[in-house]
Image (cartoon, helix red, strand yellow):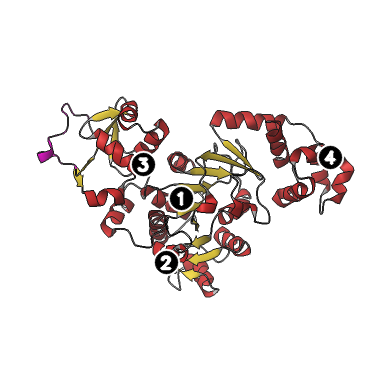
């Protein structure tokens, strides 16, 4: 715990930036050695500003203590640059964050075909469709979708991946407890339940404008490639693509009309050598040889995909239907949609199928579902959230859940 305190102390030093902190660790190896170093030793560090030197002389660790307490309260994992689980891809960039805060389950990034999807905050309807479609198709094909979670195409890509029932990762420009924008608060919950929220900013840090360009190096750094959906030639999305190029990542871009301002950025990227993509398979095919047991470039069933992508746009749980005095009708007159055996694996995860089977034609509480399925509470909660997103389950009074679809046996 003492060592972790020093990591947090170093991560909160002012005037250093990520690169300056990495240089200090290159020289001193561990943050406690930086903490106890003689001030004269800092003369050996390149480009150390007076403000940085002053910050390093401040040995007050109360801020680190507060961060530790906040992380424990919020259930956050703290990952340091030298931890074994720290993604090697990210560690190898020029300026990796020395500390990451994680809410949810951290994927083994180095074993995943992680693909970033980025784009404008004020997209066209075409861009909205493509971002959500790419998120869905990439996730359905076995890739790990990584993006931001702010307004616009980033959050739509995340929604698409969630509708595929797969893990996703969102990289934040503030603390995990500082939801931005507020209307995405349910999306934050769903990402944390299905995958992970990741940030280099400690709890309580507001989402400030200058944080997002800094954050973007993490999105590209975690990924094998990054996809631009819609953006202007000079934008945060193009900055992310520049960072991806510097990090030797693959570049992909969605083409658009020659006279469409929001397609000017992707069209320029294609001119400069980015691969033109119109569907998830165009990206997945590039990594089939590296991840043969994870990926498939086969397009998902068109009817299933359309049904999922045309589902609720918001991740707020769907309103429960009006209370009924009687249980649902017998199967021969059951009005609920029948999910055939062939469709079940395409539409739902194993956990979701187990919960739907346990619900049958009855209303049950989450505790009852845990007992019936023997699935851990957290996974049951996550699956119920995703089933509500897809309008496959509704919640009624007393936090009891009811299946809105039925499974062919």
Viewer-nearest of labels 4 and 3? 4
Label 4 element class: loop
Q: Main secondary structure of the magenta part?
A: loop
For mark 4, does the 10 Å Cα neighbourhood hold few (<14), some (14 to 19), or many (20 or more) residues?
Answer: some
Query: Which residue is pictured at 56% across the width and 35% down the height?
Result: 76
Q: CA distance from mark 4 to mark 3?
A: 50 Å
Q: CA distance from mark 1 to mark 4?
A: 44 Å
Residue 331 in magenta?
Answer: yes
Q: Position of residue 25 (x, y in %)?
A: 75, 47
The answer to which of marks 1 and 4 sits earlier in the sequence is: 4
- Residue position marked by numbered label 3 in the rendering: 386
Q: CA distance from mark 3 to mark 2?
A: 27 Å
Q: CA distance from mark 1 to mark 2?
A: 21 Å
Label 1 element class: helix
Magenta stretch: give its range: 323-336
- Residue position marked by numbered label 2 in the rendering: 282
Residue 41 in magenta?
Answer: no
Residue furthest top as drawn: 398
Q: Name the image quarter holding the C terminus.
A: top left
Q: Position of residue 304 (x, y in %)?
A: 28, 54
The answer to which of marks 3 and 1 sits earlier in the sequence is: 1
Viewer-nearest of labels 1 and 4? 4
- Residue position marked by numbered label 4 in the rendering: 37
Q: Is residue 387 visible?
A: no
Vertical placement of residue 289 versus 307, above or below: below
- Residue position marked by numbered label 1 in the rendering: 155
Callout 4–callout 2 Cβ contact below 8 Å: no
Camera-nearest residue between 269 and 300: 300
The answer to which of marks 3 and 2 sits earlier in the sequence is: 2
112 sits to left or right of 325: right
Label 3 element class: helix
């Amino acid at each position: 715990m003492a060592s972790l305190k020093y990591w947090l102390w170093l991560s909160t030093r002012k005037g250093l930036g990520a690169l300056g902190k990495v240089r200090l660790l290159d020289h001193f190896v561990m943050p406690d050695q930086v903490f106890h170093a003689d001030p004269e030793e800092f003369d050996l560090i390149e480009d150390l500003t007076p403000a940085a030197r002053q910050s390093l002389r401040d040995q007050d660790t109360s801020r680190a203590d507060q961060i530790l307490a906040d992380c424990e309260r919020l259930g956050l994992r703290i990952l340091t640059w030298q931890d074994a689980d720290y993604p090697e891809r990210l560690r190898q960039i020029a300026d990796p964050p020395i500390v990451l805060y994680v809410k949810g389950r951290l994927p083994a990034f180095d074993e995943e075909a992680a693909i970033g999807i980025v784009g404008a905050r004020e997209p066209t309807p075409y861009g909205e469709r493509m971002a959500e479609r790419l998120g869905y198709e990439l996730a359905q094909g076995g890739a790990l979708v990584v993006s931001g979670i702010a307004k616009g195409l980033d959050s739509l890509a995340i929604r698409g991946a969630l509708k595929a029932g797969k893990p996703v990762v969102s990289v934040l420009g503030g603390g995990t407890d500082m939801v931005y924008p507020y209307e995405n608060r349910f999306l934050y919950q769903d990402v944390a339940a299905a995958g992970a929220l990741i940030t280099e900013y400690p709890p309580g840090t507001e989402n400030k404008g200058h944080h997002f360009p800094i954050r973007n190096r993490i999105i590209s750094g975690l990924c094998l490639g990054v996809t631009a959906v819609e953006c202007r030639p000079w934008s945060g999305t193009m900055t992310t693509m520049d960072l991806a190029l510097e990090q030797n990542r693959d570049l992909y871009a969605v083409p658009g009309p020659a006279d469409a301002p929001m397609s000017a950025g992707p069209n320029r990227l294609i001119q400069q050598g980015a691969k033109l993509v119109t569907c998830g398979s165009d990206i997945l095919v590039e990594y089939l040889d590296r991840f043969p047991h994870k990926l498939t470039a086969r397009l998902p069933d068109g009817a299933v995909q359309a049904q999922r992508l045309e589902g609720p746009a918001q991740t707020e749980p769907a309103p429960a239907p009006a209370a009924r005095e009687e249980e649902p009708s017998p199967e021969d007159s059951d009005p609920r949609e029948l999910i055939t055996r062939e469709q079940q694996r395409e539409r739902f995860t194993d956990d979701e199928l187990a919960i739907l089977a346990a619900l049958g034609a009855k209303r049950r509480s989450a505790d009852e579902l845990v007992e019936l399925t023997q699935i851990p509470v957290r996974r049951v909660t996550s699956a119920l959230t995703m089933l509500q997103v897809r309008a496959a389950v509704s919640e009624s009074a007393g936090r009891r859940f009811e299946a809105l679809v039925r499974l062919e046996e």
